[in-house]
Amino acid sequence: MKKLFIALFFACLSVPMMAQNEDITEKYSVATNSFWSNWFIQGGVTWEAWYGNYEDGQGLSKSPFKKFRSNPGASLAIGKWFTPGLGLRTKVQGIWGKSVWDGDNYGNGNKYWLVNEQVMFNLSNLFCGYNENRVWNFIPFFGAGLGRSCTYNRYSMGLSVGILNEFWVSKRLAVNFEIGWNRYEADLCGMPADCGSGIMNHPNHVYAEVGVTFNLGKRTWNKVPDVDAIKALSQSQIDALNAQLADERAENDRLKSELANKKAEPAVKVEKEYVTTPVSVFFNLDKSKIASRKDLVNVKNLADYSKDNNATLVVTGYADSATGPADYNRDLSQRRAETVADELVKMGVKRENIRIEAKGGVDTLVPPSYNRRATVEIAK
């Protein structure tokens, strides 16, 4: 058991070095979960030892790892993570213990229990960023609580500190390796608090534990919505509506100018001149879904013209060159053009009367969001 404790101790010391080899995780804020989320229960078996200053002068080895001090034990805990890096747990441990009083008695039996409330710090999440797929977590903790010797009917307040390592084998189950130390202000081993030397007795309890953790309810954390991204998306929708309004105003100005000049042209020619004006259909940032179905009102006029005259329509897709690489923008503009072409087919235009072109990223319109569009016009 002594070798096991030493091995666990050095494993805990090596944890910070192991952390350097972990894949870099993007750090981001998480939203606070409900009260019923991120609960867990733990259970384990322990190797433990009691020792204290009441042994002074007995001529015994002061090492707490001697076999005559050690005994098996058990533990049970329940807790909750309030953030990925901060949690609380209530831990109960004990059952069997041994203490050494004199050179003739190599271990006095002492049944006991300890209850501690402990604050836990998941340093893996605090320093490396939250990652729901992380296999290993390094968790120091400290706390305070109450102990009772059932054999000697004594109570005592104490402090606790330790390190917990969790190795997740599934989304809900982890294997634990833990070492800890509890220190109490009065004797829990059957000896008087004052051993006659004027020095108060402070029993120490050290342990190494192997156990499991089981997550209850929701165990993951949701990413906080990116407010800036939401604002950018809303702004892109506004820009798309403004661009549509600008196109409508330009068309109105053209019609007003035509009426002012009293141009008398054949109806077909007027219709042809009207329908050959490119009609824009706008999209949101990085999307190939039409931002507003209202854009299809004018497209419907072109679709009717194509059906009546068996005319070919040209659908040209564009993207905003200010965002995204050239290859991606070319693909995005192609998908935008295909989306509009599909709408034309739904309106009754023959697929063979539709020609698709993809221009990729451009910067011909201001603001840049006006370039996130596809145009429809009659082939010349």
Image: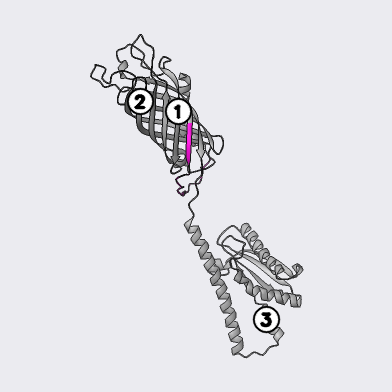
Pick whichever of labels 2 and 3 is earlier in the sequence.
Answer: 2
Image position, residue 146 (x, y; %): 35, 29
Overall secondary structure of the magenta section? loop
- How crowded pointer 3 is (Cα within 10 Å; few <14, some 14-19, many 20+) is rated as few
Task: Return the residue nearer the eye: 72 or 140.
Answer: 72
Q: Amino acid at mark 1?
A: Ser
Label 1's element? Answer: strand
Residue that label 2 marks: 148
Earlier residue among tags 1 and 3 = 1
Q: Which amino acid type is shown beneath numbered disc 2?
A: Arg
The reply, left or right, for residue 264 in relation to residue 238 is right
Q: Which residue is mark 1?
A: 75
Q: Which mark is residue 273?
A: 3
- The magenta stretch spans residue 125: no
Q: Residue 328's image quarter?
A: bottom right
- Does the stretch in magenta take in 27? yes
| x 44%, y 19%: residue | 71
Q: CA distance from mark 2 to mark 3?
A: 96 Å
Question: In the rendered image of this protein, does residue 369 appear above or below residue 70?
Answer: below
